[in-house]
Structures are given as C-alpha cells and as structure tokens.
C-alpha cells in the first residue's frame, strides 16, 4: 500500500468549522429586512392584488374557452404566473421565519443541521430581493418610456384675468 492510500484510508473527513459570524449576521439582518419590507407595505399588497387579478383572469379564460379543446397559451401563461406568484407570496414569510429560527438555533448550539445553512442563506437572499423589488418596480413605472408617464408632473396653466371693477355701492334712494 502506498503512503497516499494509507493517508486516504486513515484520514477522517473533518467537519468544516462553524461559521458563527455568518449566523450572527443572518440573525441580525433577517428582522431588519422584514421591517424594511413591512415599511414598503404596498409591495406585498401589490403582489396579493396581482394574484387576485390573475386568478380572476384564469376564471374568465376558462369561461370563454370552449370545452374539449386544449387550453390556450394565454391560459397557460396566466396559470404559470399565478403559480410563480403563489410561490413568492408563500416563500417570503416562510423562508424568512425559518431562516431566522435556523440562525438562532445555530448560534445557540454552535452547530447547524444538514441543509440549515442553505435555509438561512435563502431566507436572507429572498428577503433582500423582496425588499429591493419595491423601489425597482417604482423606478420602472416612472421610467420615461415612449407614451409613458412623464418624469415631472405637468403643471396646470394659470390664467390671469384683469380685475373687474366693483359695482357702485352708493344707494340711489
């Protein structure tokens, strides 16, 4: 047996060192991202409104389509969009809470279960993206696309009229 095979057989795979800095940062930043997302209230509300609107659109498409045919592209696109929105709407609070619990658990026990680090990482990334999407969508809405809304609101024109002379207030009687 060569010295390399002896080393390979005798060496135990050492576990990677516990990265407490990562879990401490995650346990700190997840609640801050939740607060930042909550302050942007309309972002999550818009997601929910879009979800409801798309659900109504699917019902309308299903009513107008004749039975016995394959669903149209519009139906498939709307259904896939609803599925994606459902995943995002559920993932934001679930992964955020699970990531915070996993980070606190890891700090308390100085170890994490298999896959726990990925839960914390995904929770932080998803909340970061959810927090950033509000300002990005606002920016896109107000971008000066041709025919889109202007950057500066139009001002109303003010017309100046000549003052009218006051009627004579003397009493002829």
Image (cartoon, rainbow, N blue to C red):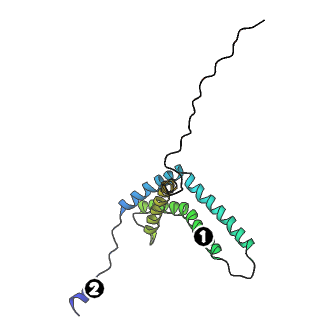
Q: Residues within 10 Å of mark 2 (few under 14, many from 20)?
A: few
Q: Position of residue 170 (x, y in %)?
A: 71, 8
The quarter in which the N terminus is drawn is bottom left
- Residue situated in front as seen by the camera: 59 or 158: 158
First along the sequence among labels 2 and 1: 2
Left/right placement of residue 72 relative to residue 43 reads right
- State the image quarter where residue 90 is shown: bottom right
Report the mark closest to the observer, 2 or 1.
Answer: 1
- State the image quarter where residue 112 is shown: bottom left
Whether 163 is drawn above or below 125: the answer is above
Q: Position of residue 5 (x, y in %)?
A: 26, 89
Check whether the beta carbons of the residues at disc 2 and disc 1 lie within 8 A of each other.
no
Whether 56 is drawn above or below 161: the answer is below
What residue occupies the far left of the structure in this picture?
3
The residue at which mark 2 appears reads as 8
What residue occupies the far top of the structure in this picture?
173
Residue at the image position 67 percent from the left and 78 percent from the top: 71
Q: Residues within 10 Å of mark 1 (few under 14, many from 20)?
A: few
- Residue situated in front as seen by the camera: 33 or 84: 84
Residue at the image position 43 percent from the left and 60 percent from the top: 108
Residue 83 numbered tag: 1
What residue occupies the far bottom of the structure in this picture?
1
């Amino acid at each position: 047996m060569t010295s390399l095979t002896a080393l390979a057989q005798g060496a135990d795979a050492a576990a990677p060192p516990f990265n407490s800095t990562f879990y401490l940062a995650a346990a700190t930043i997840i609640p801050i991202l939740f607060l930042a997302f909550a302050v942007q209230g309309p972002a999550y509300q818009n997601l929910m409104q879009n979800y409801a609107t798309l659900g109504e659109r699917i019902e309308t498409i299903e009513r107008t389509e004749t039975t016995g045919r394959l669903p149209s592209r519009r139906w498939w696109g709307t259904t896939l969009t609803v599925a994606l929105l459902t995943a995002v709407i559920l993932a934001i609070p679930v992964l955020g809470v699970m990531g915070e619990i996993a980070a606190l658990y890891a700090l308390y026990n100085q170890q994490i279960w298999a896959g726990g680090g990925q839960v914390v990482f995904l929770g932080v990334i998803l909340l970061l993206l959810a927090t950033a999407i509000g300002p990005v969508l606002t920016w896109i809405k107000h971008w000066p696309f041709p025919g889109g809304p202007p950057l500066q609101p139009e001002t109303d024109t003010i017309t100046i009229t000549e003052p009218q002379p006051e009627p004579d207030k003397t009493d002829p009687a």
